[in-house]
Image (cartoon, helix red, strand yellow):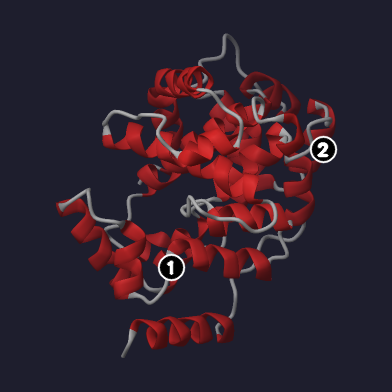
């Protein structure tokens, strides 16, 4: 079967299978978590409708990762302790992770996956503050775009655990191999396209769909291209940190977004200093 026929076959299978379903009310939760104007009290009122997420946030606020001086028992206090950035990232992560079961794929590293998502979310949010004014996007929306950028991989792992496991075996042996190319060879499409199918079915806002579909393509030109470019630059930073290799601002998207080397260098340094804390957060939330 040719690559194109394999891709079409997989897309048909994806569209005819029952799509994963977000928890009831998740759309409202996602809107609240991407609202830059919401207060801790109002955000807590929305999150408390999701007892599992509320409990995880309170637990995180009382964990050694947070190290509070005294026990935290209310959701509003937990949100204030953790801060908007962490609450937004963790809330979105827990909501979107619910429909998937990646444990079917032994080679899938949940901690690494979520560490990548969390680091990319932070970098995207920080970079968004320095984008040229006519391309500016709000930091909360940028954070969501970074966090969701690799959601398609989570779906492919859930749908095709055997095939995905073979891909992860090869990347474990050689980190220089291109994950998306291996997914195309083994499954028929990459995680970016899979994410676009899922995000469209879930009726996520168009900029988020674009960020998921186009972030791995430096030449992406369609509408809302700046979302894809911003996430792409942020993802390259998080990938360098996870691979423990140098990162250099040589991406052509940096100039298109109006950044200078000093600005992106400062964001990468900030991300690097926080990376260990982010690894511990991913381990606390999704450690197996």
> Where is residue 6, by image quadrant?
bottom left
The answer to whether 14 appears left or right of 42 in the picture is: left
Mark 2 to mark 1 CA distance (whole Å):
33 Å
**Residue 70, position in %: x, y?**
60, 11
Question: Residue at label 1?
Answer: 156
Comparing 18 with 212, the one in front is 212
* 162 to 13, vertically: above or below: above
Q: Residue at x 41, y 26 (%)?
A: 275
Residue 112, image x, y percentages = 36, 43
Q: Which residue is mark 2?
A: 45
Residue 182 visible in the shown view: yes
Where residue 254 appears, x then y in whole percent? 52, 34
Q: Quadrant of residue 257?
A: top right
| Quarter of the N terminus within the rendering | bottom left
The reply to whether discs 2 and 1 touch (Cβ–Cβ < 8 Å) is no
User: Label 2 neighbourhood size at 10 Å, few (<14), some (14-19), many (20+)?
Assistant: few
- Seen at 29% across and 28% down, the residue is 246
Residue closest to the eye, 275 or 232: 232
Could you say which is closer to the camera, residue 19 or residue 177? 177
Tell how many labels: 2
Residue 285 placement, left or right of 199: left
Q: Is residue 64 visible?
A: no
Q: Nearer the viewer, mark 2 or mark 1?
A: 1
Considering the numbered disc 1 on the image, is that residue within a helix, a strand or a loop?
A: helix
Between discs 2 and 1, the one toward the N terminus: 2
């Amino acid at each position: 079967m040719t690559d194109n026929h394999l891709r079409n076959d997989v897309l048909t299978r994806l569209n005819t299978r029952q799509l994963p379903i977000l928890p009831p009310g998740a759309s409202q939760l996602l809107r609240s978590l991407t609202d830059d104007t919401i207060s801790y009290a109002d955000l807590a009122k929305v999150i408390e409708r999701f007892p599992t997420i509320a409990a995880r946030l309170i637990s995180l606020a009382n964990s050694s990762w947070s190290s509070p001086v005294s026990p935290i028992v209310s959701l509003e206090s937990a949100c204030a302790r953790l801060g908007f950035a962490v609450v937004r990232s963790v809330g979105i992560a827990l909501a979107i992770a619910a429909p998937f079961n990646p444990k079917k794929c032994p080679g899938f590293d949940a901690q690494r996956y979520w560490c990548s998502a969390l680091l990319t979310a932070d970098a995207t949010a920080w970079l968004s503050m320095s984008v040229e004014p006519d391309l500016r996007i709000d930091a909360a929306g940028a954070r969501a775009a970074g966090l969701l950028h690799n959601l398609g991989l989570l779906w492919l792992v859930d749908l095709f655990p055997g095939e995905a496991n073979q891909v992860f075996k090869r990347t474990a042996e050689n980190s220089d191999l291109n994950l998306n190319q291996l997914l195309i060879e083994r499954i028929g499409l990459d995680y970016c396209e899979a994410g676009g199918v899922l995000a469209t079915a879930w009726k996520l806002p168009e900029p988020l769909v674009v960020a998921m579909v186009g972030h791995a393509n430096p030449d992406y030109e369609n509408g809302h291209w700046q979302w894809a470019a911003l996430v792409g630059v942020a993802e390259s930073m998080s990938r360098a940190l996870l691979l423990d290799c140098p990162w250099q601002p040589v991406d052509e998207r940096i100039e298109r977004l109006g950044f200078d080397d000093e600005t992106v260098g400062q964001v990468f340094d900030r991300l690097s200093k926080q990376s260990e804390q982010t690894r511990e957060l991913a381990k606390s939330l999704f450690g197996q």
